[in-house]
Structure formats: C-alpha cells, structure tokens
Image (tube, coloured by chain):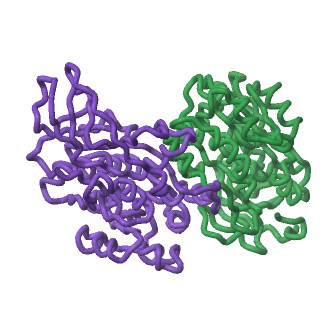
Chain colours: A green, B purple
C-alpha cells in the first residue's frame, strides 16, 4: 500500500515558453487505480513511474500563456500530463475542450477514460443482451457507475457489488441498479449473489478481483462473459495472490474471461465519446464524482482509492 | 482417482429386436478424460453417470442383426453408446461409417470428437496466425496431437508439453513439433517455456490446467488467447484446487481465456470432419493411437488416462 511518506511535493522553476508551446495551470487532476501498477517495475502495459520524477495522468488545465496560434489564454485542455500546478507543454500533447458541453471534470470521468473503459469493456467484451443479468464489482467506482448505467440502458438486470451501504444506496436509489450487495457485510457472498441473480450471471464486469470475483464466478451461466477491467483488491499485494483455480468453472460453463485496457479501443474513442455524451445529454447517464480540493491532497486522495473512500470518479481540484 | 474396485462387469440378457432396431457388437470403445466429470454429480455440461448402470461414450460397432432396411449386418456404425459388448439400439442413435475412407478407429480420434475438439478450439478460439507461437499442454494426448499438427499446418511455431521423453520424441520426430518440454523433469517450467518461446506465447491450448498452465500463462504475450479444453490435472482433486490468481496477468496482457466443449460447434461438425479428412488424405495429419485389447481392459485403460500412459488417442478394441 502506498504511504504518504512515499510522496514528496517539490518546487521547480517553469521553463520559458518556446514557439508552439503552452503554459498550463492544472484545474483537475485524475487519480486512477491503474496508476498503482506504474509504481512497480513489473512488465505491464504502461511504463513505470520514475522515482524522483512527477507522476503523470489525466489532467484538465487552463491555458495561462500561449505561444501557439491555435490556443488562447483561458482555453481549457485535456491531456496526459504531469502532476504539476503549472507546466509547459507542446500543443500536440493536449486536446481543447468545449467549456459549454458538460461540466469540465466529467472529461476525466464519465466522458473520459473511465467512461470509455466502461463503454468498450461492457459492450465489446461483455456483449450484454436485454434480459440478461450483469454483475458489476467495484460498482460505485468511476468505471463501475458507468457500467451499471449502460447495462440498464441495454435492458439488463444489474447487480452492483460495493463496500458500503452509502455507496449501495446511491447505486440503488440514484442509478436504479436492481440489486446491491455489500461485500464487507455479507457472510456468504456466493449465496448472496445466487439470491440476487436467480437466473445466474451472464456478464461479470470485474473491477476488483480476489474473493469477491470468486463468489461471482461460481454463479456464472453457460457462455458467460467475464470482463477483466481491474483487480484493485490485489494491486497492493506483497505476495503472489492465490485463490481457487477458476479454469474448471470456465471450462464447464464454456465461459469467456477477457482482459483489456481502454487503449485497445483507441481507434473507436470518437464513437464512444459521442454515445456517452448523447446518453448524458438525454439524462440517461449521470456522472457521480468525489472531488477533493487542493494540489497537496493528491497523495492522500490517490491512497484513498484503495481504501474505497470514493463514490464515482475521484479527482482533485486545484483552486484558483 | 477412480480405482478398479469402482468398476464391475456384469452379464445381462440382450433384449429382442423391435422394428427399426439394430443389434450391435462393439468393435472400439473410446475412453476420454471428460468422462471423469460424469463420475460426479456436480453441475456440468453433461449428465452424470448413474451408479449401477453402464458407462457410455463414443463407440464404433458392427451391425450383427438389423430390423431396419437402411442397415445390413456387417455395416459399421459410430454412436454415443453403452459400454457393452452387445446392445440393441434404434437406428437414429448411430451413424454409418465408410469402411474404406480411413481406419475405423480414427473416427473415435482424429476424425471424431477429439479431432473436432482440436479443430474448433484451436481455430475458432485460439485463432492462430502464421508466425505466432502456439503452446500445447497434454500435447501427446488425443486432442493435443491434432492441435500440434493443425498449428503447424497454419504456419505457427509449435511447442508441446508432455510427461515423458517417449511422448516428446514422438511429438518432435514424427509430428515435427518445433520444441518439446517434459514437465515432469523440468525444475523451472516457467523458465523452460521462456527458453522454448523466445517471442512469447500467443496461443495456449490447455488440456491439463494446474501448475503446468501457470507456467505457460506467465509467458503469454499481449492479446494472447488461452483455449481451455481440459483440466485433467485437476479432475481427481478432492479439495478445491488453488493456485496463483491469473486474472492480473490476463488483465495486463489484454489476454483472452475461453472455455468450450466441442458440442458448442455441433452445427459446424460437417465442416470440421471434411477439413480433417482432407488433411488426413493429403498426409498432413497423422492419427496416433494407443489401442488396448479386450472389453475387460476398459476400467484400467480409463484409469490410465490420468496416469498419462497413452500417446495419442486411447481406446479399447473388442476382438472378434
């Protein structure tokens, strides 16, 4: 588990702007579970962070100064940027956002990477069919809340698993998830899932891994699809996590388990953003956020991801 | 593990033939790993065997007497039949075989269920591309030998894993498998697979499960496909088998793991048999068999499946 003592906030001079460059002031900085994987040098799909260098990830920023004719001070941009209050970037590193389409922070959540992750993972791998049962773990997280809502739009029965009654009340009352399960209080999670899914589980969208996922997988139907999106319960393990071997279940059920990262679908991001934005404008999709104030809160906010403190997208706003 | 004492051979009278029925004399009886699953009442894709009733499975038989105009004494038929020396069946239960196309026993192996399992599992789920690396566990088994050969036909590098030097010599020298690994003598199987697969593993056709599969899966490439065909190493487990959690690897590699049974592809069996028969007639596919003589050898032959005694398809011939 990362600790506050692993983080340091330092001051450095901002380089002068060259031709074509922009000076950006961060407005919203995203903290995401996948970043934990970058804090290890194990082979993965993203480069590890370097000790002594700023972290980086999804950032929404305002243009403070521009040496590029395409950008004006006051423009809002989105990019994969450093965790810095100010930074100089070349214009190709960022994308200009429309300030009037949606609240800006949604471009780090429902209308950004987590939304696209939910959209492609559920629809392209999970392939839910109206009337089927979709179970979502980490259902109250940034990706999970979007998965739950898209599954409902597609006419599925949706069962959400989360770790607090508050999160589950939100899922049930606001997102209209059909059944909710608090994995922290259920003594027999496998039986609880069987009760919530009398017709079995057709699609399992897995954000957490570990024993929660075991309990779901023992309830899958024939030809079930298991979408491996995250394994947050295991990210801080020191030892190699072990558990029941699940291949015999997948074999007996002719089930599919597929891992993915959202960048696999990069050529189709335009399609995803367009559909998510349309659902949002029609009121079918709502983008729950947990916003923490202050650049200095980044370390503890990031650590909070693994303590399950957030409902919906977790991000840090930099005031001013 | 099934024991000889779990089996019994009894004599019963054969019922008289009714209109449309056939009296069959068994010639070849297939023993298959999937039958072990039918010796348990756990929910599965096939009905459990009933204690006190004959086992049943793939059988090639000769028509001894016919009350059906479509069949003549001496005709050879294939069907899912009882483990009996003689039995009366209705004609719809069996399919007539061409005695001149191929040795009859191959219809229980390469040109039958194991061949179709290899064909659809490898091509439809594994989707091997020329130049990719395909690893096959249980490579010397009835399904494995066909998978190895189809992967070579498709232009892949093929790495076979089996449990004896004799099996591996057959894979290497007769089937021209590129690399072979004896999992029983390798101290570090993960490293052995890494050495045999310098470009990583693109397709893993898994007949065995357990620690052999773990070692392969730690070597998979991005977008690898894992075909779950069998888990023979686990079929006789008394406890729930445990092992390392593999979802984090599947997630990091955007890999697919898919269980299947051959009957998922039943509408396309004609296509599969046609292609397998063509490859056989062109000499591209050879059908290794281990044939044991005598009806009374069925129990020990079946048990031998789990002791790894066979190379290629294992079956029992009933003389006379």
Q: Residue at x 27, y 55 (%)?
A: B294
Q: Residue at x 15, y 32 (%)?
A: B65
Quarter-of-image position of residue B21: top left
Which residue of the protein is positioned furthest toward the top in this rendering?
B19
Please state the horizontal and vertical placement of residue B297, each as a whole percent of the image.
Answer: 33, 56
In the image: residue A48, left or right of residue A13: left
Whether A300 is drawn above or below A170: the answer is: below
Q: Quadrant of the N terminus of chain A?
A: bottom right
Quarter holding residue A82:
bottom right
* Front position in the image: A214 or A238: A214
Percent coordinates x, y for residue B162 in the rendering? 40, 69
Q: How many marks?
A: 0
At a point 75% along the width and 48% down the height, the residue shown is A60
Q: Position of residue B129 (x, y in %)?
A: 34, 57
Q: Is residue A315 above or below residue B291?
A: above
Across and down, in percent, residue A230 comes to: 67, 51
On screen, B35 above or below A192? below
At x 78%, y 45%, the residue is A74
Locate residue A320 relative to residue B236 in the image: left or right: right
Is residue A29 visible in this depiction of the protein? Answer: yes
In the shown orientation, is residue B126 left or right of residue A281? left
Q: Is residue B224 visible?
A: no
Q: Choose between B295 and A89: the one closer to the eye.
A: B295
User: Is residue B17 shown above or below B188?
Assistant: above
């Amino acid at each position: 588990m990362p600790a506050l003592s692993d983080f340091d906030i330092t001051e450095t001079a901002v380089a002068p702007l060259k031709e074509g460059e922009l000076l950006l002031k961060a407005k919203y900085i995203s903290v995401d579970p996948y970043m934990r994987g970058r804090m290890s040098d194990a082979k993965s799909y993203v480069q590890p962070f370097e000790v002594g260098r700023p972290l980086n990830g999804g950032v929404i920023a305002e243009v403070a100064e521009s040496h590029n004719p395409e950008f004006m001070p006051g423009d809002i941009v989105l990019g994969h940027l450093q965790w810095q209050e100010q930074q100089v970037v070349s214009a190709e590193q960022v994308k200009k956002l429309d300030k009037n389409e949606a609240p800006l922070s949604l471009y780090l959540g429902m209308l950004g990477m987590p939304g696209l992750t939910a959209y492609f993972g559920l629809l392209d791998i999970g392939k839910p069919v109206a009337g089927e049962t979709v179970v979502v773990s980490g259902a109250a997280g940034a990706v999970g809340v979007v998965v739950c809502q898209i599954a409902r739009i597609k006419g599925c029965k949706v069962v959400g698993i989360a770790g607090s009654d508050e999160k589950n009340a939100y899922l049930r009352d606001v997102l209209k998830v059909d059944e909710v399960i608090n994995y922290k209080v259920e003594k027999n999670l496998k039986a609880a899932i069987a009760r919530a899914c009398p017709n079995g589980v057709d699609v399992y969208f897995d954000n957490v891994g570990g024993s929660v996922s075991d309990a779901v997988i023992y309830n899958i139907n024939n030809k079930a699809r298991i979408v491996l999106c995250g394994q947050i319960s295991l990210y801080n393990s020191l030892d190699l996590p072990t558990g029941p071997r699940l291949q015999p279940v997948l074999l007996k059920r002719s089930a599919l388990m597929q891992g993915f990262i959202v960048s696999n679908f990069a050529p189709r991001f335009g399609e995803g953003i367009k559909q998510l934005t349309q659902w949002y404008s029609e009121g079918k999709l709502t983008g729950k956020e947990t916003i923490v104030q202050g650049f200095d809160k980044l370390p503890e906010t990031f650590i909070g991801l693994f303590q399950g403190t957030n409902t919906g997208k977790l991000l840090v706003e930099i005031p001013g």
